[in-house]
Image (tube, rainbow, N blue to C red):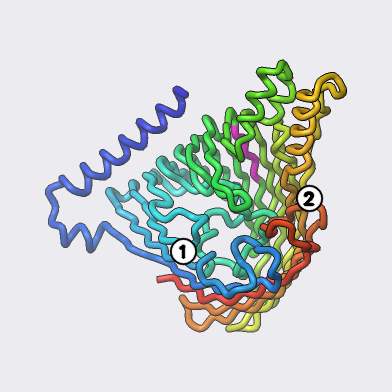
Amino acid sequence: MLFKKRIKNLSNTLLALVFSNVLYQPVLARDFMDERVEFSGFARIVAGYLDEEAASFEGYDDNISLSEQSLLGLQADIHLTDTLTVATQLLAHSSEERKSGIEWLYLNYEPDQYWRIKAGKLRTPFLQYSDVLDVGFAYSWISPPQQLYSSYLFSNFDGLSVTHRNTFADLNIDIEAYWGTYDDSVFVGGDEVNIEVDEILGLIFQVQHDNLQVRAAYAESNEFFADFLGLEDLAVVLERAGFQQSADSLRFDGSANSYQVGVRYDDLDYFASAEWFRIEADLLVVPSVDGYYLTAGINLLPFQLHLTYASAAPEYAVSQNEIPRGIAPQLDQLALGYDQVIDSLPSDSLDSYTLGARWNMRANLAFKVEFTRLVGDRDARSFFDVADNAQFDRRANLYQVAVEWVF
């Protein structure tokens, strides 16, 4: 908790520094705007349709929708000095499962070409495209593979990051370390879940040689708590009945680790990339998840074609039910309730096959089309939201078109 208070105090200090430099320095406003402030932005309009009436996938159903991924982002970089910059990004999102507002706000200090220090509200760099996930113009897909880039990964945190950049022979090497806290909510399976993480620690190692880039990352989230689907109420009942082990197994109170490896190659004729991501947790109700994708494409300027296969397979560390049966009806009901909770834990086991095309209409404007075949486990959630009592085999096709713009 002391670390969290320091982070909050740091954020307040950053804001004070911004206002003291921007609002109260004796400079002409016009000169400051011309020389010190840079504005940029991005936008995307995405339409999608799922050919299944019994379920929805990431908000898409059998009605054409433009509200799940369409957004507008504006960014300002305020150069306080030659080495000190304040960066902020405002995001307006059309989805009900995504909050609009300040996506990041941080102080960026680069004393030389080798070091970069950022402090404030930052993007959480779990994955290869985490930093540019909202900027659809920056990658080939309309929707990055859901098996990795799903909504339950929190997109930002409050903290610090330090990056060291250097070259060795023909290699460009970046090493980044970051730490911070998170206290907000994410959407999991259509439900808003409050998450509090007292400490996030991460390390990223990235090497680039000509057109080849390799990235490896590790992160750990210590002492995190989540209020998920009222499981705490059942845990309290189990605890009062003397079944502490079963009670603890239902609580989102522990730690989790993540691992990532990614490879990208891109030249004028073709491109290919692959990424693997694993989450491990010491909690029963949080599964260990392995997800990966393989993608390849060709450049036929100004057109681009690509094909992607992605897969995810979660695994729960099932705990033995310690509640005895056959002694009293109340205990039988409690044991049955516990088993039902364990059996209902969501499993997002899914394979997907994506075929997409991109047309770079202008240097800053792209049009995309995409078809994704979704093949989930019949006994799993597989990222689908299924209507009550509906018969659905977890097979569906997702069709999307998008316009991507940067300015």
Numbered range of the magenta stretch: 217-221
Q: Quadrant of residue 140?
A: bottom right
Q: Residue furthest front?
A: 329
Front residue of 383/45: it is 383
Residue annotated with mark 1: 94
Front residue of 110/353: it is 353
Q: Position of residue 239 (x, y in %)?
A: 67, 20
Classified by dominant secondary structure, the portion drawn in magenta counts as strand
> From mark 1 to mark 2, how far is it between C-alphas?
30 Å
Viewer-nearest of discs 1 and 2 = 1
- Residue in the image at 49% along x and 40% along y: 162
- Residue in the image at 50% along x and 38% along y: 182
Q: Residues within 10 Å of mark 2 (few under 14, many from 20)?
A: some
Q: Position of residue 23 (x, y in %)?
A: 18, 48
> Is residue 185 in view?
yes
Residue annotated with mark 2: 313
